[in-house]
Amino acid sequence: MVRIAVDAMGGDLGPGVVAHGSLRALSQLDDETRILLVGNETHLRAALGGRSVAGVEIVHAPEVIGMHEAPATAVRRKPGSSIAVAMQLLEDGRADALLSPGNTGAVVAAALFGPGRIHGVHRPAIATLFPTEERDCVMLDVGANADCKPVHMLQFAAMGAVFARLRLGCERPRVGLLNIGEEDSKGNELAVAAHALLRQSGLHFVGNVEGRDLLAGRADVVVCDGFVGNVVLKFAESMLGFTGGLLKSQIHSSPRLMLGGLLMRPAFAHLKKRLDYQEFGGAPLLGVNGVVCIAHGRSSVRAIESAVLGCHALVRDQLIVRIGDELREIGGDLLENNEQRTDHGNG
């Protein structure tokens, strides 16, 4: 049985959207799957139309952590919040995965306070799928760690490689370090030191990749600190809407272009689906001792559906066990020695 705890109160669009998306995902999964909707019981029963649904359990959580609350403080002060209650279910073994479209920082903090990190992991990282010319790539970290040490970047690469194998089917994922140039000596102190570690790691490291290389698909796993990764991710999200708006205004500028737009509609629909974050589902928080996925705050029914299905797949594929195996393969001595060496360095 796979049990997925869903923070139903975190999304910007309300618990009804989260509940509906969860039900759509449940209808595609086996009879052994259970959805634990966590949130205000009255609101959730209303979202379900006052009826009981097979495979769905409501877990009452009277409090909500807002998007603008200080993450760690909010988690401590609101043990009855939907994020905290859902994370407790995961920590206690009553859930096998957790999905939240709520406050990202609060989810990270609750995961560290609760289930904690996988043995050997220094920092968790948020991974996301990024479209490229060839196929999707994995980029991490995209928001959990603004300041990093070289050893953290090495671990991000190892965890990202595991996720790429499971989600993209890459037998030997190509790992690239996001940087301002291809040469080994390029970048700040963090980038140069991380580059050296990745060279020694035994991972399939293809060197530095620049911003223009992201869309070209030069790497299957792109590693960066959470500050850079989050900026890149938010910029990419804004470009989809910006480009779509420009294209729409141009098409409506003349009857001839409007006719051409009608003929191109299937191609536009395919392109939108290819680039739409809703198709990718939640972004996993890699490195914590449990499957934790973070969905976009504005997640639609389709986005929640994709995210629940993604959580189920990561439980089925034993993500946590495989990350531990990957870190042991890199070598505990290398990780420990470099953690000691970098304590007074970057980050």
Image (cartoon, grey):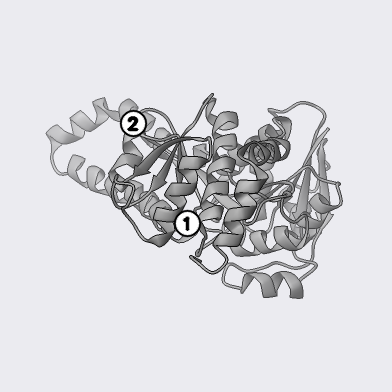
- Looking at the picture, which amino acid does disc 1 mark? Asp
* Res 133 label: 2
The mark that comes first in sequence, 2 or 1, is 2
The answer to whether residue 285 is seen in the rendering is no
Position of residue 103 measured from the top left corner of the image (x, y, whole percent): 61, 62
Residue drawn at x 23%, y 32% is 261
Q: Residues within 10 Å of mark 1 (few under 14, many from 20)?
A: many
The answer to whether residue 168 is seen in the rendering is yes
Instruction: Name the residue beneath numbered marker 1.
Output: 225
Q: Find numbered disc 2 in the image and state the secondary structure of the residue it sits on.
A: loop
Q: Is residue 59 left or right of residue 241?
A: right
Q: Residue 307's image quarter?
A: top right
Q: Is residue 97 above or below residue 122?
A: above
Residue drawn at x 15%, y 44% is 253
Residue drawn at x 41%, y 46% is 177
Residue drawn at x 72%, y 28% is 29
Q: Residues within 10 Å of mark 2 (few under 14, many from 20)?
A: few
Front in this rendered view, residue 228 or 332? 332
Q: Residue 340's image quarter?
A: bottom right
Q: Find numbered disc 1 in the image and state the secondary structure of the residue it sits on.
A: loop
